[in-house]
Amino acid sequence: MQDRYHAVTKPPWSPSSASPQDIEALAAALNALDSPAIGALDDLSVDMVELAFNSLRPKGPTGFAR
């Protein structure tokens, strides 16, 4: 099976504040999801994801990606 989500660790596709390890962990977690979560993720825009990450507390993105 081929992964749907890949880790891109350089701007502009990933925030400069995110570590490559966190981005790779997030990609692995997303690839482990099944339907209907996959369909919901496909409907998200880049702006929606950025807003969600910016809404997390400072330690939020690190804990979220684990």
Image: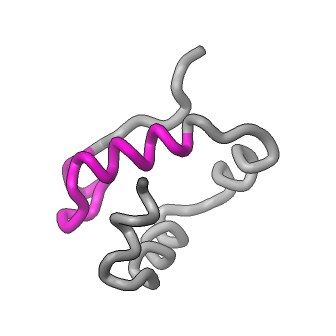
Residue at (35, 40) in percent of width and height: 7
Q: Residue at x 73, y 55 (%)?
A: 40
User: Residue 1, position in %: x, y?
Assistant: 60, 14
Picture quadrant where residue 25 is located: top left
Q: Quadrant of residue 32?
A: top right
Q: Is residue 2 magenta?
A: no
The C terminus appears in which quarter of the rendering?
bottom left
The stretch in magenta equals 9-30
Which of 57/54 is in front?
57
Residue 27 drawn at (x, y percent): 44, 42
Furthest residue in direction top, as rendered: 1
Furthest residue in direction right, as rendered: 36
Residue situated in front as seen by the camera: 5 or 13? 5
In the displayed structure, does residue 63 sit left or right of residue 20? right
Percent across and percent down for residue 22 are 31, 52
In the rendered image, residue 21 lying in the magenta stretch gets the answer: yes
Look at 49% across and 37% down and name the residue there: 5
Spot occupied by residue 3 in the image (x, y as percentages of width and height): 52, 26
> Residue 48 falls in which quadrant of the image?
bottom right
Callout count:
0
> Which residue shows up at 79% across the image and 41% down it?
35
33 horizontally vs 64: left or right = right
Question: In terms of depth relative to the viewer, which is nearer, 43 or 53?
Answer: 53
Left or right of 15? Residue 55 is right
Task: Work out whether 6 lies above or below 43.
Answer: above
Where is 39 relative to 4, above or below? below
